[in-house]
Image: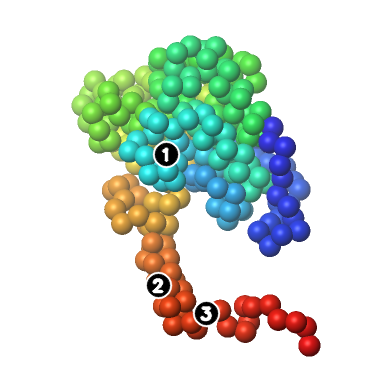
Amino acid sequence: MSTFTIDTSTSRATPSPVPGKRMTAPAIRARKADGKTGQPIVMLTAYTMRMAQLLDPHCDMLLVGDSLGQVIYGLPSTIPVTLDMMCAHGAAVVRGSWHALVGVDMPFGSYEASPAQAFESAARIMKETGCAAVKLEGGEAMAETIDLLTHRGIPVIGHVGLTPQAVNVLGGYGARGREDREAEKIIADAKAVADAGAFCIVVEGVMEAVATEVAGSVAPPIIGIGASADCDGQVLVTEDMLGMFERTPRFVKRYDDLATRIGEAVRTYADEVRSRSFPTADQIYRPKP
Ligand code: KIV
């Protein structure tokens, strides 16, 4: 567990974490009973303390996704993301949140070799970040691993459909499940992950009918991304939905245009620095009168 907490005496601790009970994996799992979910589960990605502070009051779950490889580090895919990166960002997000369940992605190469390798990596993530769950990609092939983790005290979020860590096998990021055989495989994957004990499952980038079928046929909640409104919850990459990038995939709805707004603010700052109109008397230290 991270030994650091936010210094609440500084301006950057606002809003301060409020003591209370965090969402738990059993509470998320219990949102879906007898195949029905009353209140859909709200999940967003977070990679930093500040973003976690802003998202936490509105979300049931915060995902420290390995999409941070592209979003934070400018990497070409999630493949180069390391356990060190996931632990550092996971700990920051736990520090910045107090209500949402924090789940941390297991990066490529940290879990696929064997259930024992997965346990070692997941245990490190949980100890170093204080998160409450890990997420790993894969269906039937990962069932034994998910079974072992969940029976050793590690709640697991499954991830099937378009699995970005397998981009080199899939050949791209296009939607999955267009053909019957592939659709059946995705449904079988979701069932295997559910039977193995995942408390919820992300279904990414699949044809709507496939996602609807999965949501209707497995017991744990299905969190969709590029999937279907019939899912038990939804997740997006926060920087995508805030409009931080010029281009976003079709399944993203932009709720803001932060890239433009940041550009405008920074241009104003640059103009004021160059014209010496910043700083003004309000922003400088002078002896008290
Ligand atoms: O890494 C990530 O951000 C994810 C979500 C897109 C589900 O896995």
Residue drawn at (50%, 83%), measured in percent from left and top? 277
Q: Using the image, determine if residue 83 lies above or below residue 239.
A: above
Asked if the beta carbon under badge 1 is closer than 8 A to the nearest atom of ligand 1, the reply is no
Q: How crowded is mark 2: few (under 14 residues within 10 Å), some or many (20 or more)?
A: few
Q: What element carries label 1?
A: helix
| Nearer mark to the viewer, of 3 and 1 | 3
| Nearer mark to the viewer, of 3 and 2 | 3
Q: Name the residue under label 1.
A: 69
**Distance from the alpha carbon under mark 3 to that under mark 2:** 13 Å
Residue drawn at (48%, 22%), measured in percent from left and top? 110
Q: Residue 276: image x %, image y %? A: 48, 82
- The reply to whether discs 2 and 1 touch (Cβ–Cβ < 8 Å) is no
Q: Which of 235 and 54 is in front in this view?
A: 54
Q: In which quarter of the image is the C terminus?
A: bottom right
Q: Which of marks 3 and 2 is nearer the N terminus?
A: 2
| Nearer mark to the viewer, of 2 and 1 | 2
